[in-house]
Structures are given as C-alpha cells and as structure tokens.
Image (spheres, helix red, strand yellow):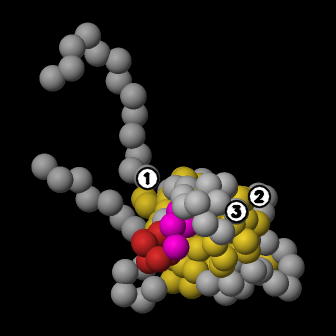
Amino acid sequence: MQEKYEYSTDNIKIKLLDKNAIVPKISDIDRVISFYANEDLIFLPNKRIIIKLNLIMSFNKEHVLFISNVPQISMLNGLYTIPKFIRSSITENLLITMENTTSQRANIKKGQKIAEGILIPIPFTQIEVVKELA
C-alpha cells in the first residue's frame, strides 16, 4: 500500500546578504529551483571552488533542499556542481561547490545558472530494532 504525503505550499524565504546576490528562480513547469553566479568566476583546470551565493534560505522544516548539477553546463564546459542536501533553515551564506573536471581553464559569467535544486519532503519515520529483517 502506497502512503500519501501532504505537500506544503509554504514559500521559500530568502535574505539577500549583499546587492550582488541573485534571487533564485523556480520553474513553473517542473518546480526546479535555479541558482545563479553573482560574479564572474574563473575555474582552473581540475580544481574545485566554493561559491558564495550571498543569500540565506529558509523553507518548510518537513523538507530538505537537494542541490545538484546543471547538465547543460557539464556537457558544455566540464563544470560539475557537487550535489548536497540542505536542511530547512540555513543560517549561513548558501555555498555551492563546483569542480572543473577538464584540463582547460573555464569561465562562468555573472548571472549564469550554476546549480539546480528541488525541495524534497521528508516523511515521518521511526526506527525499530528487530531480530530479523523480513
């Protein structure tokens, strides 16, 4: 039997930490959240950089935000966003880690999409210790 989950339509709250921060956009089609570079970035070959988005996010505590790669960027220039889960209340600057997987220098322009995210509901669960797993 499949369980039913209630989905909240609570808003995502964002605090911008400086004037260069770019507000993420949510797609009306697939509800994917797009995150953008707030400055020009240079990626050295085979190196990772941590990008500060200069914003703090808060959303429904019954969700996590899964941030992942943008396939078009990876295929085009070998830049890869390191996936991560974020809990509902981020109290620090949101960070995106990207890696240049090539032996060439790569660039990202201010305003270019660097990561995608989706809110994932967390079902209520309990842990039960058993002698055998069925």
Q: Position of residue 6 (x, y in %)?
A: 36, 64
- Identity of the residue drawn at 21% across and 14% down: 132
**Pointer 2: what residue?**
91
Label 1 amino acid? Ile
| 18 left or right of 76 in image | right
- Residue at the right extreme of this rendering: 18
Query: Any magenta on residue 95?
Result: no
Nearer-N-terminus badge (1/3) = 3
- Look at 62% across and 84% down and name the residue there: 112
Residue under label 3, please give it: 44
Q: CA distance from mark 3 to mark 2?
A: 30 Å
Q: Secondary structure at mark 3?
A: loop
For residue 122, the mark is 1
Tell me if mark 1 has few (under 14), some (14-19) or many (20+) residues whose alpha carbon lies within 10 angstroms of its own: few
Within the image, what quadrant is residue 93 found in?
bottom right
Numbered mark located on residue 34 in the image: none
